Every structure is written in structure tokens, then in C-alpha cells.
Amino acid sequence: MRSAPDGEYQPLYESKNRPLLPRPVFYRRLAAHVAVALGLIVFSLGIGMAGYMATEHLHALDAFLNTAMLLGGMGPVATLATSAGKLFAGLFALYAGLVFVACATLVIMPVLHRVLHHFHVGDKA
């Protein structure tokens, strides 16, 4: 829900009884969703890099590579030497899987809503 200028709350997406958004407004909505997804990815990169640097004492570039590979679904590159590093990598891999699903959903949702909305504009409830 978001706040309207008059103080009332409006749903994030328009209902099927409302017309389709104009393309420029839709593109702004899509850009906002992509920005949130990118923010989540940058935040996750920071967490992963900090974790690898703390547990495995990797340099920043190596920590970035391992983190990016996990977030991309490929798996870590460096051989993990410590138990703490292995535990962190396992937990971060689980987190990275959820981040992937969340980011994919954030980017696809406005497009999917618009397609479904297009077919149901004017339908009676």
C-alpha cells in the first residue's frame, strides 16, 4: 500500500476495473522494481564480501568473485579452508537462492501484472 496525496492508502497495483497505466507510468513502475532488485543485489554483495573477508580472510576481489558466483547460482570459486568459512558459504548460498527468487519476482511482477490486467480490463468482479 502507498499513500496518496490526499492521505488515503492506495494499492500498489491498479485493480481490473481500472484502465491500463500509460506506458511512461508503467516504465517508471518497472524501473522502480528494477532499482529495488539492484539494491537487494548490492546489499547482498556487501554481506557476502564481508563474510568471506572475515571468515576466509580473502582479499576484496576474491570475496567479490565468490559472492557473485553464489548469487548467480554457480557456487564458490575459492577452496574454503576454515569451518567458519564453510558454514558462512552454506548459509549464504541458501540466502542467495532466496535473493535470486526475490529479484526475479520483483522484475517480472510489473510485466506479468500488466499482461494479466490487459486481458481483464473491464471484467465484472
Image (spheres, rainbow, N blue to C red):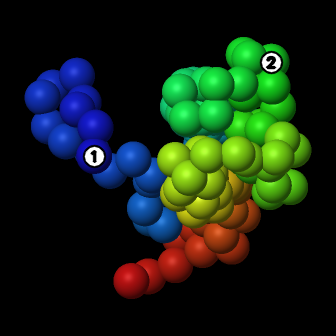
Q: Amino acid at mark 2?
A: Leu
Residue visible at 28% across and 37% down in the picture: 2
Q: Are marks 1 and 2 in contact (CB under 8 Å)?
A: no
Residue situated in front as seen by the camera: 43 or 76: 76
Residue visible at 24% across and 30% down in the picture: 4
Q: Is residue 6 visible?
A: yes
Counting labels gives: 2
Residue visible at 15% across and 26% down in the picture: 6
Residue annotated with mark 2: 61
Extreme residue in the bottom direction = 125
User: Residue 82: percent from the left, percent from the top?
Assistant: 61, 46
Indicate the secondary structure of the residue bearing disc 2: helix
Crowding at dot 2, Cα within 10 Å, few <14 / some 14-19 / many 20+, comes out as: few
Q: Amino acid at mark 1?
A: Met
The quarter holding residue 49 reads: top right
User: Residue 119: percent from the left, percent from the top?
Assistant: 68, 73
Residue situated in front as seen by the camera: 105 or 60: 60
Indicate the secondary structure of the residue bearing disc 1: loop
The quarter holding residue 93 reads: bottom right
N-terminal of the two: label 1 or label 2?
Answer: 1
Extreme residue in the left direction = 7
Left or right relative to 43: residue 89:
right
Nearer to us of marks 1 and 2 is 2
Left or right relative to 81: residue 6:
left
Quadrant of the image containing the C terminus: bottom left
Residue visible at 81% across and 55% down in the picture: 75
Residue situated in front as seen by the camera: 27 or 98: 98
Numbered label attached to residue 1: 1
The quarter holding residue 77 reads: top right
Q: Is residue 43 visible?
A: no
User: Residue 95: percent from the left, percent from the top?
Assistant: 54, 55
Left or right relative to 124: residue 92:
right
